[in-house]
Amino acid sequence: MGAINPQTNEENPIPSTIEQIKVVGKNYVVLVSIGPGVYGKAIEEDNVKVKRYEGEIVKGFKVGQEVIGDLQQKDDSFANILIFVGIAAGGLILIILILMMLGFF
């Protein structure tokens, strides 16, 4: 596909569309669509940075921000919501049990 320049032996970027980014264990899995019926998959241990080409549409990603950072922030906020709901439910159950022991129910 001409990804490596034979004269300078440097990598040439291939414009593609990000289809999916997953965190699997300690690895980041990036799935991209390069062209009709041509897909790419990269597995990285470090954070993944995505560069936007001028004039292209980036689906679901904000320009100038690191994609993985955005995904981790969403995961962290979801985890915080789950913790809050768990603590609230536990507190409610505790209050109901205390009221039952005092004979209000």
Image (cartoon, rainbow, N blue to C red):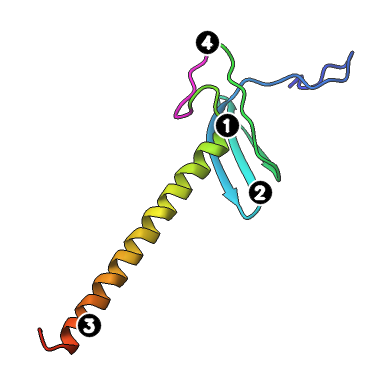
Report the magenta stretch's main SS: loop
Task: For marks 3 and 2, give the CA distance.
Answer: 44 Å
* Quadrant in the picture for the C terminus: bottom left
Q: Circle 1: is it few (<14), some (14-19), or many (20+) Cα within 10 Å?
A: some
Mark 2, residue position? 27
Q: Residue at x 31, y 72 (%)?
A: 90
Give the residue pinned by disc 4: 55
Q: Position of residue 9 (x, y in %)?
A: 88, 20
Q: Give me the residue at 55% from left, 34% from top.
A: 67
Of residues 7 and 93, which is closer to you in this image? 93
Q: Viewed as shown, does residue 66 lie left or right of 82?
A: right
Residue type marked 4? Gly
Q: Which residue is mark 3?
A: 97
Q: Earlier in the sequence, mark 1 or mark 2?
A: 2
Q: On residue 38, which mark appears?
A: none
**Local crowd at mark 2 within 10 Å, few (<14), some, or many (≥20)?**
some
- Dot 4 falls on a residue whose secondary structure is loop
Relative to 97, does residue 46 appear above or below in the rendering?
above
Identified by mark 3, the residue type is Leu
Q: CA distance from mark 3 to mark 4?
A: 61 Å
Q: Which residues are magenta?
A: 55-61
